[in-house]
Amino acid sequence: MAVMSTLLPSEEEATLAKLSSRELAAYVETAAASQQVAISDKEGRLHQVEVPVSALRLLVDILIELGDGNTVKLIPVHAEMTTQEAADMLGMSRPTLIKILDEGHIPYHRSGNRRKVKYKDVMHYKQAIDNKRLQALNELSELDQALGLGCRVPHN
């Protein structure tokens, strides 16, 4: 799953999320497959709930994002997305994404007259592009060093 949302947390929510993520993270580091969590109902009665540790780790990730003031939304890895959602995730326009789809860089299928892409395919493309950018930056840095064009400190 990926984590995103449309509502920004309030300052109070962000502070509480930051504190609770730290406390919960301490209990998630366990070899157990599940943990008991206590939740109170409307009347204040506590109820024990068994929760998979993997879900608690996801909750910690969500709380960290909220604590940083970010919005959160869960997207199943096997979920299908509209082209607009995929374009937003990649930080590009929808027409640019359509061009990428038509060139075969990201697999898609049609549902009626709409294109649908899988979240995992969009993330695979994003990772590949990020890796290419990093490689290009490393090559430029090496070239700068080889040519002596790196940052120079002025002599006094």
Image (spheres, helix red, strand yellow):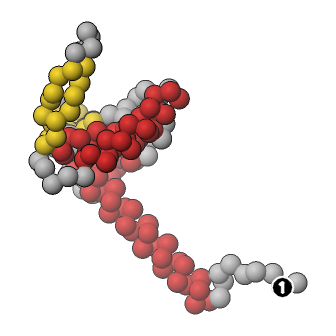
In this orientation, does residue 156 appear?
yes
Left or right: residue 59 compared with residue 154: left
Spot occupied by residue 132 in the image (x, y as percentages of width and height): 39, 68
In the rendered image, the quadrant that contains the C terminus is bottom right
Work out whether residue 21 or residue 120 is closer to the camera in this orientation and state it: 21
Spot occupied by residue 116 in the image (x, y as percentages of width and height): 21, 39
Which residue is at 13% across, 34% downward?
50
Left or right: residue 89 compared with residue 152: left
Which residue is label 1 attached to? 155
Which residue is at 20% across, 40% downward?
55
Q: In this view, does 141 lie above or below 8?
A: below
Work out whether residue 71 or residue 143 is closer to the camera in this orientation and state it: 71
Q: In this view, does 91 lie above or below 103?
A: above
Left or right: residue 49 compared with residue 136: left
| Residue 48, quarter of picture | top left
Q: Is residue 85 above or below residue 106?
A: above
Spot occupied by residue 123 in the image (x, y as percentages of width and height): 29, 52
Q: Which amino acid does label 1 sit on?
A: His
- Extreme residue in the front direction: 45
- Extreme residue in the right direction: 156
Which residue is at 31% across, 48% downward?
26
Q: Mark 1: which secondary structure?
A: loop
Work out whether residue 108 or residue 1 is closer to the camera in this orientation and state it: 1
Q: Is residue 19 above or below residue 146?
A: above
